[in-house]
Amino acid sequence: DAKTTQPPSMDCAEGRAANLPCNHSTISGNEYVYWYRQIHSQGPQYIIHGLKNNETNEMASLIITEDRKSSTLILPHATLRDTAVYYCIVSLDDKIIFGKGTRLHILP
Amino acid sequence: DAMVIQNPRYQVTQFGKPVTLSCSQTLNHNVMYWYQQKSSQAPKLLFHYYDKDFNNEADTPDNFQSRRPNTSFCFLDIRSPGLGDAAMYLCATSRGFRTYTQYFGPGTRLTVL
């Protein structure tokens, strides 16, 4: 079973920051937080991952709370191409167990 | 540049007729995974290979088998497809475990008639 809880859907206006929350209250000390997204009819795509510290790359930022029980994925300037299902995953080793994810709608 | 290639993209088979789906990678990654994704559901891990070591998920039906003849190729065999096996089948690779990104192919959509 997935160890994360995400809202089933969210809307965001084009050009605004999209903030996607994830709850992982049972995360263990060695588990990483990963984010993937899946655009319709494509395979999932890696976005970012982190352990304790906040992370940023060319796609997004990941903010992890100090107690590590929740995190937020931030897409700084959402575009229509960011419309997708976003999956938050916690993983220790070889397994990525996908939860239901958040369907993000970018509104023009 | 294609990195994880799945062929065919669409496959139609008949109920009970064996079918093989193919995955190849140009990344020289050690690990290859197969996922099943049914309509409106999240991908579900079926099994993976770390090099030649095969790891089956506990709830993967016996009807599903896999082969990895070399580093680049991995096959998913469905011995007797049922209507419930209609799904998108996703192949993924990673260099190793822990912190290594998984790279997914575009998937093969299987239809069972």
Image: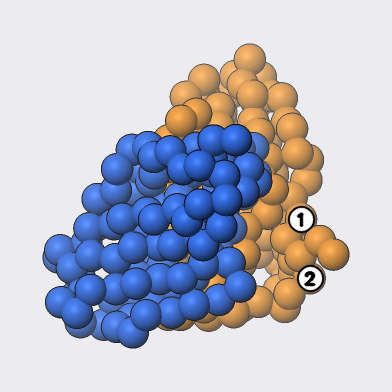
Label 1: chain letter: B
Mark 1 near mark 2, Cβ–Cβ under 8 Å? yes
Residue B13 higher or lower than A31, as above or below: above
CA gap, disc 1 and disc 2? 8 Å
Query: Is B63 left or right of A92, judged from the image as shown?
Result: right
Q: Chain B's shade in the image?
A: orange
Which of the marked residues, 1 or 2, is nearer the chain's N terminus? Answer: 1
In this view, the residue in front, A61 or A90, is A61
Amino acid on which the number 1 mark rests in the picture: Ile
Pinpoint residue B40: horizontal percent, then vertical percent. Answer: 46, 30
Q: Chain A's shade in the image?
A: blue
Residue at numbered disc 1 = B5
Amino acid on which the number 2 mark rests in the picture: Thr
**In what quadrant of the picture does the N terminus of chain B appear?**
bottom right
Answer yes or no: is residue A100 visible: yes
Residue at 61 percent of width and 21 percent of height: B112
The image shows a total of numbered marks equal to 2
Residue B26, disc: 2
Query: Is B60 left or right of B68, judged from the image as shown?
Result: left
Determine the residue located farthest toward the top in the rendered image: B113
Residue B48 higher or lower than B44, as above or below: below
Query: Is B106 left or right of A37, judged from the image as shown?
Result: right
Answer yes or no: is residue A92 visible: no
